[in-house]
Image (tube, rainbow, N blue to C red):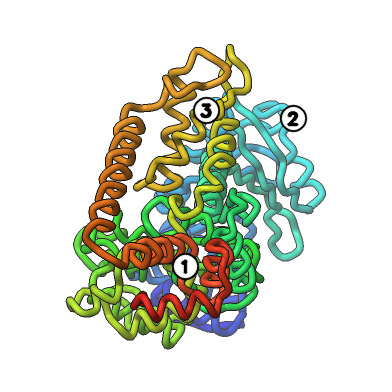
Amino acid sequence: MLKVSADQKIIETVCLALQSNDTDICMFDDELQVQYQLNGKYLIDLFACGFPADLTLKSLTKGSSPLMSDSGTPGHNMFGVGKHWFISAFDSLHDGILIADQNEIVRYINKSFERISGAKFSEIVGRVLSKARPGAKLGSVIRNGKALLGVRRKFGDTEYITDMHPFILDGLCVGGITVARDITEIQQLQTKLSKYQIQYNDLLRQRDKENTARYTFSNICGTSPRLQEVKQLAERLASSNLPVLLRGESGTGKELFAHAIHLSSSRANQPFVTVNCAAIPRQLLESELFGYSEGAFSGAKQTGKPGLIALAHNGTLFLDEIGDMDVEIQAKMLRVLQSGEIQPLGNITKREVDVRVISATNKDLEAMIEAGKFREDLLYRLNASELRIPPLRERVEDIADLAQYFLSLCIHTSLGLLELDAETISILEQYSWPGNVRELENTIRFIANITDRQRITPDYLPQVFFQQKTINRRNHLSQTRGRADELLSLKDGKATIEKELIATALSKFGRSVKEKRKAAEHLGISLTTLYARMSNLNIK
């Protein structure tokens, strides 16, 4: 038994009771020379409901003390310490409280119980529980002395759960308490949470869709030798983790190759994150790439934001238009490639990342290095393996197949499947295509939308194609006349024409050994003869 003085503060007594794990408290009043016995468990419970910390035990002896008998000996009156404290404490609770004595007479309900259950204090307090609350189970709890938990109730639109406990003092049940908990708010919160969860899952799916490669090598149309050679090299590179630099004019399909390389690699099931370095303002590109911590800069999200490099972890990061990246950000990108670590803005810690970098550009990076606009060391990191995507004018054989493929995507509701006639295809093949495959696709879409015939004739081609054809014809006539003049003025007209033919073949097929062999076959000579003629004609 824990012995304390009547001048002891309640908070001190509670602490002693908790430390000693003793619920039997003997209080001695020196002034009155009286000894009281308290029930420490209910003293702790009631103190937890909001009794003042500076209240002393002596104040419990004033008036009727529910924690002790009026004679100072242990009693079974279950309430505590002054009626006004009791009412104030329980009325402040959000949960509803109903208390009945050992005779199953309702002694008290708080305001929350009135709100939750619809019961009125004036109508049920002082009445027998079974009559005041038909169907109430607290009576059986008091009779059996066993708690009953999780009983669901409903009043109007309010759903609530009740837990019922008996009051046991010295082995006897002296009453019971019902605690009613409104679950309507919880259910509303659950509904909102479910709604937010659906939205969150939708955002995740959208993010995953955006960070997923869509094109394989089979989506890259064309059978020309130039294209097939590039595709074969790209397929071999896909199996490695080397960085790849894709070079080519705008519209040649560099992004398709990036997608295809990723989907043919061991990282195919991991994220494929695209960053268009030209589309994101320089001031934002750094935070988009590396992410930032809370409060990193004015306007930053309070929760921070992961960077695109971090989102590409274990996958592929595609840096499109790498030539437009600011030099300062190039230096940070170089450190990522060297160390495999990123440091978000406003954060002192670094994070390891495993990404394969594929970059693309239509710019002359070597010239940019000379001009101080691109880092030479970054170029060496990016072009561990390099692919040059040929422009459409160098693979004329693919134009007809590409045009028909794009046309098949444009299903005309009234005309059915559209097709190009031979003359239209011939004009398309004579065009120079400065916008490459992208321009061809847009041209076909334009034709498909304005045609009123299933078989498309040259009448539907934009005027620029006929202007180009006229220019080509004039240039041809001019070149022919020029050659005639040269024959009149130069003895070695044959060498001039031969040099032009070889230069044209090299321009078409390329200058690697393999490409020169194809050029020689096209010219009808051996590779050795080609090298000899190039040397004699000073062709480099």
Q: How many marks?
A: 3
Tell me if mark 2 has few (under 14), some (14-19) or many (20+) residues whose alpha carbon lies within 10 angstroms of its own: few
Looking at this view, name the residue that lies furthest to the right. Answer: 144
Q: Mark 3 highlights which residue? A: 120
Q: Name the spot of residue 320 as percent of width and height, x first.
A: 39, 61
Using the numbered discs, state the Cα–Cα distance from disc 1 to disc 3 in whole angstroms.
95 Å
Q: Is residue 192 above or below residue 54?
A: above
Secondary structure beneath label 3:
loop
Between 317 and 360, the residue placed more toward the observer is: 360
Residue occupying the point 70% across, 26% down = 131
Q: Amino acid at mark 3?
A: Lys
> Disc 1 or 3, which lies upstream in sequence?
3
> Disc 1 or 2, which lies upstream in sequence?
2
Residue occupying the point 52% across, 74% down = 356
| Residue 39 seen in this snapshot | no
Q: Is residue 319 above or below residue 438?
A: below
> Disc 2 or 3, which lies upstream in sequence?
3
Q: Mark 2 highlights which residue? A: 135
Q: Amino acid at mark 2?
A: Gly
Using the numbered discs, state the Cα–Cα distance from disc 2 to disc 3 in whole angstroms.
17 Å
Q: Amino acid at mark 1?
A: Gly
Q: Identify the disc placed on residue 510.
A: 1
| Residue 277 position by quadrant | bottom left
Residue occupying the point 59% across, 50% down = 222
Picture quarter with the C terminus: bottom left
Residue occupying the point 71% across, 46% down = 150
Q: Name the spot of residue 300 as percent of width and height, x first.
A: 27, 61
Secondary structure beneath label 1:
loop
Between 106 and 155, the residue placed more toward the observer is: 155
